Amino acid sequence: MRYLLVLFICFTTIHSFSQDSTETQTPTRVKGTIISTTTSAPLSEVNIVNINQVVGTSTNDNGEFEIKAKANDTLHLSYLGYKSIKVRVTNDWLKFGNTEIEMTELALALEEVTVKQLQLTGYLEVDMKMIPVTSNNRYRISGLPNQGYEGGNPNIATKVLGAIFNPADFLYNMFGKKPNEMRKLRKMKENDEIRNQLAKRFDREMLMVLLQVNKYDLDEIVNQCNYSRDFINTANDLQMLDAISECYEEYKLISRTKDRKKGKRRDKS
């Protein structure tokens, strides 16, 4: 009888402990509702991507969404005609559930930008000092007829020269120095929701956010992987993703081959 009593107490303790641990376990998904700042109406079909875990979803007709996330993950929200935003997932959000998020129309967001006007005096010497000296430059590379490159930063000439005369170095700088971002390529290809979102887009925004590159570098990666300018100009974001992914896989294969050759040379020496 005493043995049965001890066994019953142990079973009750284990059951209550497991129940408490389940109740206190941190949720792994967050819920939210996205509304417009101007109308306070819910926004449907807003694209939401968890940058850290590379998963995506979109809002329903009521502006509601649910996505896999943990504390300190960053969600990227984008919607046609609205300013894209990034939202950090907090412990409170995970704990207390649905959170309302506002998005601002692009027209209103642009109104907030203040353009400083030039206060001209009428005196040529004074006014010339107030006008910016350079705003845009065009570079021509000797030996390449009818080729020109424009940019506001003179450093772009160095980048263009490096890309043309040593594409392998350019790809190494892009792929080799961003291993974490490039690992996301496979996850992006495997996530149906992200693929569906990218298939409808041509702005490269989501690709730039996930891979942490700018639009110039994004286009140049595909260019150095022997894709035509026509493809770059007409491809949707999903096609760009597949092109970069294929190029990255080839880059990894070439890098491994080079490493093996270096290893053999060291062994011989």
Image: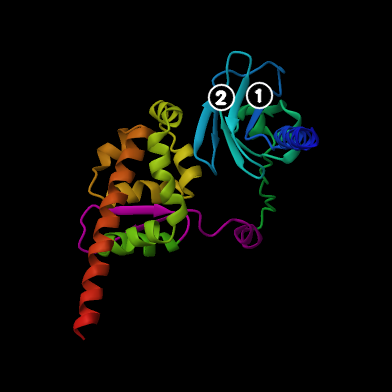
Q: Which of 240 and 104 is in front in this view?
A: 240
Read off the residue under disc 2. Answer: 46
Residue 223, relative to residue 264: is it above or below? above
In this view of the protein, which residue sits in the foreground, 47 or 266? 266
Circle 1 residues within 10 Å: few <14, some 14–19, many ≥20? many
Residue 6's place in the image compared with 253, above or below, is: above
Question: What's the residue type where badge 1 is placed?
Answer: Ile
Q: Counting other residues with Cα less than 10 Å from the Cα at mark 2, is it few (<14), some (14-19), or many (20 or more)?
A: many
The quadrant of the rendering that contains the N terminus is top right
78 lies left or right of 4: left
Residue range corresponding to the magenta coloring: 124-153
Which residue, as the protein is rendered here, is positioned at the far bottom? 269
Residue at 58%, 30% in the rendered image: 67
In the shown orientation, is residue 174 left or right of residue 44?
Answer: left
Q: What residue type is labelled 2?
A: Val
Whether the magenta-drawn stretch holds residue 150 is answered as: yes
**Residue 52 drawn at (x, y percent):** 55, 44
Q: Mark 1 highlights which residue?
A: 34
Measured in 3D between alpha carbons, the distance from the residue under mark 1 to the one under mark 2, in whole angstroms, is 8 Å
- The x, y position of residue 157, in whole percent, is 38, 62
Q: Give the quarter of the image for residue 127.
A: bottom right
Q: Disc 1 vs disc 2: Cβ atoms closer than 8 Å?
A: yes
Q: Is residue 112 shown in magenta?
A: no
* Label 2: element kind: loop
Relative placement, left or right, of 258 versus 90 is left
Image location (x, y in percent) of residue 115: 66, 43
